Image (spheres, grey):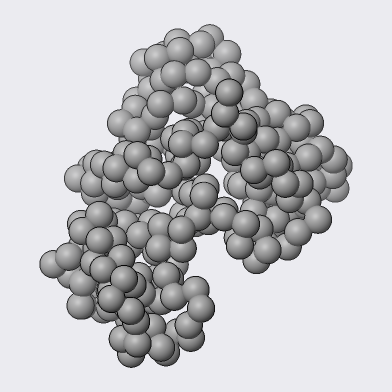
Amino acid sequence: MNAKLLEISNLTVSFDGFKAINDLNFSMLPGELRVVIGPNGAGKTTFMDVITGKTKPTQGTVKFKGKNLLPYAEHEIARFGIGRKFQTPRVYLNLSTRENLAVSGARNKSVWAAILGQSTKAERHSVAGLLATIGLEAKADIPAGLLSHGEKQRLEIGMLVAQSPDLLLVDEPVAGLTDEETVNVGELLLALAADHSILVIEHDMEFVRQIARQVTVLHQGSVLCEGTMDQVQSDPRVIEVYLGQTESEVMKE
């Protein structure tokens, strides 16, 4: 039986008496692609903040590959192999697409060394492979600031992969994207899921349908239910928390 990659037990996060996370229990195995959904205020962002060390819980435990993360700072947790992509793309706008990937993958080099091309053949090959994976080979040498919003999202996912994390945390990657761009990001995540463990937070139900294997639903800081997309979308508790909408209305959001 596989050891759990991420295991969260009895987690509570209180802000001035308000419980953003309330006795939450969650786990995922290596190689999983898990999607976390839930209405506004369900605790999704706080959930990710605790995993990455940005927020410390009031009580409970967070273990990654068996290691208790609570004593560690954000940068230390990142070194353990957890990478996070935020909702708004964080790329170097004045650097080229290729340079962004090179800088992200340059663990033991200065930023300038990476930008000026002082890289090994293996590093150049890795960047070329990432450009192909994220579908930006044709735009490898233009400033990232000229990319579309969807292309910036794919670039940042590529920058995350360049850091070789064991777990990719991806926060609302298709917010504000066109339908075509949404499909492109979904196909990228599905391709990456062949070799990576990925945890995605998302609101767009069409996108969730595209990529979801296992879905976790949060409500009021706790896990409401888990299962396949079909199981989740037919669960009466899920339908109820989405403002009492009918099943078809909930899944059109």
Q: From what the image shows, is residue 155 above or below residue 213?
A: below
The picture places residue 105, in percent across and down from the top left corner, at: 42, 70
User: 67 or 101: nearer the eye?
Assistant: 67
Which quarter of the figure has residue 226?
top right
Residue 54 visible = yes
Identify the residue at image location x=58%, y=19%: 225
Residue 83 on image: x %, y %: 53, 56
Task: Tell me which corner region of the image, top left, top right, bottom left or bottom right, holds residue 125.
Answer: bottom left
At a point 13% along the width and 67% down the height, the residue shown is: 138
Q: Position of residue 37 (x, y in %)?
A: 51, 32
Of the 4 image quadrants, the one containing the N terminus is top right
Q: In the picture, residue 144 is in which quadrant?
A: bottom left
Please state which of residues 10 and 30 is positioned toward the viewer in this rendering: 30
Residue sitting nearer the eye, 237 or 99:
99
At horizontal 55% and vertical 32% (from top left) the residue drawn is: 29
Left or right: 63 with respect to 123?
Answer: right
Left or right? Give the position of 241 relative to 187: right
Q: Is residue 144 shown to the viewer in this render?
A: no
Tally the numbered discs.
0
Decide which of 173, 133 is in the foreground and name it: 133
As displayed, is residue 113 above or below residue 53?
below
- Residue at 30 percent across and 65 percent down: it is 126
155 is higher (above) or lower (below) than 55: below
Quadrant of the drawing holding the C terminus = top left
